[in-house]
Image: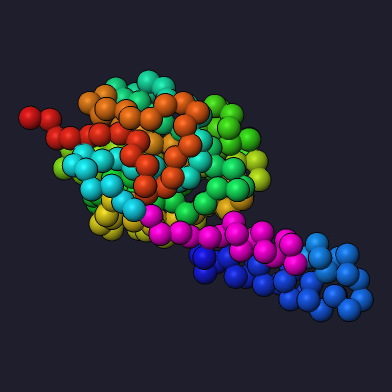
Amino acid sequence: MVKDGYRFALPPLILGIILMAFRWWWAAVLVALGLFVMYFFRDPERQIPSEPGAVVSPGDGRVVEIVDEPLEGRPGKRISIFLSIFDVHVNRAPVAGKIRKIEYRPGRFMAAWNGKASADNEQNVISIQTPCGEMSFKQIAGWVARRILCWKSVGDEVTLGERVGMIRFGSRVDVWLPAGAEILVQRGQHVAGGATQLARWLPTK
């Protein structure tokens, strides 16, 4: 479990235990809430793909969009993944490389499955320089989520599938890849952070 989860889970659990002798109904609700928070902050180990050129999902969830989208004049595709409150919310590096830029953008808190969330919602944009070129992915807040955590800094080297942050309580992650990347997932597919290969991206010869 992510350490940050203990400060959210322990108060309702402790209060629920105290209330068991007086208000069993409220005690049951508080204990259930505490257990769910512990479940939400779970952080399972993942089998990271070893295939050359693998681009992995930065989070658990359902692929809701795969669209053509240019970035700074470069053609490419955006893959958007919706994370429900029942998914693991730890975010992982989709590629190995060096973090070139981290840009926080304030915004709205629309439902994370809404297509406009990619552009309009509060988000953290992380750009990674790789041997193939530069790519980026976004941590995007949703209607419930109001806190984006990034555990890395500009200049840090990250490995494929390495933990880089999390978003609390329902959210969205986007991955942008240049036109040369081969997309391997489909809309509606459920993916696992660090384990599911979203694309194959090899250096151009």
In this rendering, position of residue 11 left or right of residue 54: right
Most frequent secondary structure within the magenta stretch: helix
Residue 159 against residue 192 in the figure, above or below: below
In the figure, residue 71 lies in which quadrant? top left
Q: Which residues are magenta?
A: 31-46
Q: Position of residue 134 (x, y in %)?
A: 25, 38
Quadrant of the image containing the C terminus:
top left
Residue 128: % across, % down: 28, 45
Give the vertical position of 169 relative to 197 (above or below): below
Q: Is residue 103 visible?
A: no
- In the rendered image, residue 155, in percent from the top left (x then y), is placed at 27, 56
Whether residue 21 is in magenta: the answer is no
Outermost residue toward the left? Answer: 205
Q: Does residue 120 appear left or right of residue 182 in this picture?
A: right
Coordinates of residue 200 in the picture (x, y in percent): 25, 34
Residue 117 location, quadrant: top right
At 42% across and 26% down in the image, what residue appears? 186
* Closer-to-camera residue (96/120): 96
Can residue 43 be seen here?
yes
In the depicted view, which residue is nearer to us: 204 or 26? Answer: 26
Q: Residue furthest right?
A: 22
Query: How many marks do you count on the picture?
Result: 0
User: In the rendered view, how is the structure colored?
Assistant: rainbow
Identity of the residue drawn at 92% across and 76% down:
22
Is residue 155 placed above or below 3 in the rendered structure? above
- Please check the rendered image and state whether residue 37 is part of the magenta-colored stretch, yes or no: yes
Residue at (18, 42) in percent of width and height: 52
- Kindly identify the residue that appears in the image at 32 percent across and 28 percent down: 183
